[in-house]
Amino acid sequence: MACSETTLESFTLENRAHSFPPAAMRANYMIIGRCLHILTCFGNVKTRSISSPVGLDLDDDLTLARLAAAWPRMESLALETSLMNLPSGMTLQDLHALAVQCPQLYSLDMEFNPSPAPSLIGHACMSQYRMRYLDVGGSPITRESRPPSIARFLSSLFPNLARISTPRENEDNEDPEEIDQHQEAIARHLLWKQVQDEIPEFVAARREEHNWARV
């Protein structure tokens, strides 16, 4: 079936592997920015799912900000690492680009490095109110990452963000055997849940400050 730049509304791009690629072969599975350049012409697409067993490398001449600018009608975006938990080159600053360029985005699945959280200076007026769901995958987080700072930044960008998910979302994270086998993943899950729970508190505090400023 043929499609045009104006009629395509959804696409899925997968680079599959059934087992962990050896280190020498990982570059062959990486989806890089130049590969995605041909998709920027589909400006009316609302749902995008892009997956690679070793992740995506958008640190070349095509950044996530440029992709976001090309896809202003996007409602759901998944940039997934399907097999290996490798460090992501994306950051919280990239989420700011999505907030600015994609006003209809309500669901995001993306791994990123949340530390350090950027300053809120210059971002206060860039809130995007449609975002509700964020799946962070295996995104790293520790207490040294300062979860409250991450929550404060996310609450400014996405005040209505209601849920942050990880791969441990539907697992028994209190079972001793699970804790023994998946200690690091459970620790990350609990810290991301802390971020989730603190977002509405920062939103409420910001609203209260605004109301006091008007008195």
Image (spheres, helix red, strand yellow):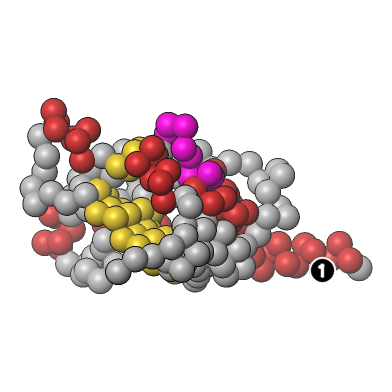
Q: Amino acid at mark 1?
A: Asn
Q: Residues within 10 Å of mark 1 (few under 14, many from 20)?
A: few
Identify the secondary structure beneath mark 1. Answer: helix
Residue at horizontal 41 percent and vertical 51 percent from the top: 39
Residue at horizontal 17 percent and vertical 51 percent from the top: 16
Which residue is label 1 attached to? Answer: 211
Q: Position of residue 11 (x, y in %)?
A: 35, 63
**Quadrant for the N terminus in the image:** bottom left
Q: Position of residue 170 (x, y in %)?
A: 25, 71
User: Which segment is the magenta one?
Assistant: 59-66
Residue 35 inside the magenta-drawn segment: no
User: Between residues 92 and 104, which one lies in front from this camera angle?
Assistant: 104
Residue at horizontal 53 percent and vertical 51 percent from the top: 70
User: Between residues 125 and 9, which one lies in front from this camera angle?
Assistant: 9
Against 201, is 31 above or below?
above
Residue at horizontal 24 percent and vertical 54 percent from the top: 14
Query: Is residue 135 visible in this depiction of the protein?
Result: no
Q: Position of residue 127 (x, y in %)?
A: 65, 59
User: Between residues 65 and 207, which one lies in front from this camera angle?
Assistant: 65
Predominant SS of the magenta segment: loop
